[in-house]
Amino acid sequence: MDLQYSQEYEDFREEVKAFLAANWPLQGDEAQLGVKEQGALFRERAIAAGYQARGIPRKYGGSEQEPDVLKATIIGEEFARVRAPAEMRGIGPSMLVPTLLECGEEWQKEKFVAPTMKGEIHWCQGYSEPGSGSDLASLKTRAERVGDEWVINGQKIWTTGAHLADWMFCLCRTEPDASKHAGISYLLIPMKQEGIEVRPLKQMNGGADFNEVFLSDARTPADHIVGERGQGWVVSRSTLKHERSMIGDSRQSSLMFKGLVRLAKKLGRIDDPAVRQQLAELEGYVLAHQYSGYRQLTCAARGQQPGPVGLMNKLNSTNIGHRSARIALDLTGDAALLGPTPTEGNMYSGLGESAGWITQYMWSLGIAIAGGTANIQRNVIAERGYGLPRDAAAQTSK
């Protein structure tokens, strides 16, 4: 296996390093700005230099670079090395924006892409409903065309960030007489209106990132539909693809493992043979995930398909995350019995501190559901990746 880049790409790496040396961390008065303001200013310069938002056309606020997965990888490596602000991530930038670029109307791209990438518009995802989680196509939220508007009635649940969101991209049943997959449309709905009520769902760590959302004669303009009417299921596959890609990034697994090693050192457990054995086994999974990513990267650079392994990234990432957190709790001991406050730690910050790992353990149970549950993902790998027959129970209930 040759993991070396060609001279062309090593020269590009030096260009990225030079940009970072000149622009991060910020200096002078700019260094006195808040964290959010510093990140926004740096990202603006990174986009102008062609290092971020590379796949987004300039007219939508991107840098419009030719696709080059090796250059993108080098940028990610070098930005991470100096802890420079990465591209905006999350529900809007990582899931909706690429969906709009693939499936949206021109005016939708112009209206939503740039503000979303700048963090000026925040989004939530209206997919799951009570009784319609794994079987998402059975959703019951309905949208009726009334004049120049859609009128929406129904309920969504497990809606991450709905209490903070400005807009929701939402799956609604618009063709009640069609088959369940064919009668769904993908709507963009403003959250700040009288017809929408958001109720937080209290989590066991004390926080409330998830919500249930009630839509009672909520409205959105008729043209705020992505794709064709009744074809929302097809559009939703695009969003789901990008969600799984976001969750399955092997760099997250590597960062988590490094945080676990820091924790073991801090607690004086790094020389314990049993701990070292656990870490060695886990590192094997992390490296397998990482090298699988390299193989997929090579395939992408050559215009090839990686095969079934491309379906495994999300499952591998969530498995590693849960196993890492479980080891961390064993290392932490009795301190793991103390629940963190809602502000202590999140998925990737604070890994090296006990509170951050307690939150990560709780989060690892939920993230296994995001983008399709782990069991559903195993079915996808088996059926679509390896051509195995569908589960008998699934065929019976069809």
Image (spheres, rainbow, N blue to C red):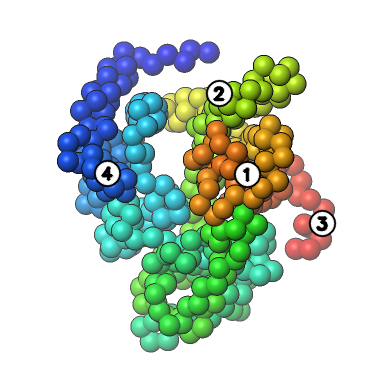
Whole-percent x, y for residue 61 in the image: 25, 50
- Residue 24: x %, y % from top left: 26, 32
Specify which label sits upstream in the sequence, 4 or 1. Answer: 4
Find out whether the residues at labels 1 and 3 contact each other: C-beta distance under 8 Å. Answer: no
Q: Residue at x 64, y 50 (%)?
A: 339
* Local secondary structure at mark 2: helix
Label 2 – label 4 distance at C-alpha:
34 Å
Q: Earlier in the sequence, mark 3 or mark 2?
A: 2
Which disc, if any, is residue 38? 4
Amino acid bearing label 3: Ala
Other-residue count near label 4 (Cα within 10 Å), few / some / many at <14 / 14–19 / ≥20? some
Cα distance between the residues tagged 1 and 3: 36 Å
Residue at the location (56% across, 42% down)? 356
For the residue marked with disc 4, what is the amino acid?
A: Gln
Q: Mark 2 points at which residue?
A: 291
x, y percent for residue 273: 73, 17
For residue 393, the mark is: 3
Residue at the spot 60% in from the left edge and 38% down from the top edge: 354
- Within 10 angstroms of label 2, few (less than 14), some, or many (20 or more) residues? some
Looking at the image, which is closer to me, 220 or 358? Answer: 358
Camera-nearest label, 4 or 1: 1
- Secondary structure category for the residue under label 4: helix
Secondary element at tag 1: helix
Residue 215 vs 270, above or below: the answer is below
Q: Mark 1 points at which residue?
A: 358
